[in-house]
Amino acid sequence: MTPGHSPGSQAVLVDTEKGLHVIAGDTVTHHLNMDVPKSTSFWPGPLYVDLKEYYERLDRLKGFGGMILPGHDSLVFKKVTYP
């Protein structure tokens, strides 16, 4: 489970031939949330239940090293398909 608008939100990990893709849902809402220095946590979204848990989950998603697809960013649609 990952943080989001309410308890029970999820992110989905998809292992593809070209690497891991993370469908982040509400955990990472926009690409700007990930625009941080390499050793820094992603910025959390505005809605959460437990901020400490949110940062832990963001660090875990970041640690996977895959391509993260934010849940509310129209830039995701610049690509027609993903592997």
Image (spheres, rainbow, N blue to C red):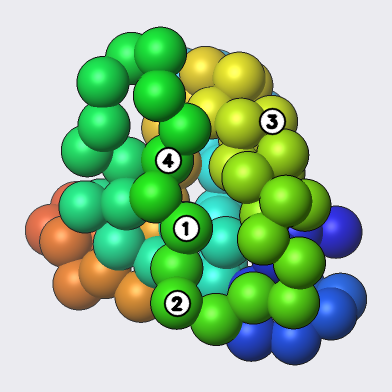
Q: What residue type is labelled 2?
A: Pro
Q: What residue type is labelled 1?
A: Pro
Q: What residue type is labelled 3?
A: Arg
Give the SS element for disc 1: loop
State the image coordinates of residue 78 (x, y, percent, origin top left): 13, 58
Residues at discs 1 and 3 in contact (Cβ within 8 Å): no
Label number found at residue 42: 4
Label number found at residue 44: 1
Left or right side of 67 for 26: right
For marks 2 and 4, give the CA distance: 13 Å
Give the SS element for disc 2: loop
Neighbourhood count class around disc 2 (C-alpha, 10 Å): few under 14, some 14–19, many 20 upward: few
The residue where tag 2 is placed is 46
Determine the residue located farthest toward the top in the rendered image: 39
For marks 3 and 2, give the CA distance: 19 Å
Question: Is 36 located above or below residue 78 in the figure?
Answer: above
The residue where tag 3 is placed is 60
Question: Is 67 located above or below residue 47 in the figure?
Answer: above
Specify the quadrant that holds the N terminus: bottom right
Residues at discs 2 and 1 in contact (Cβ within 8 Å): yes
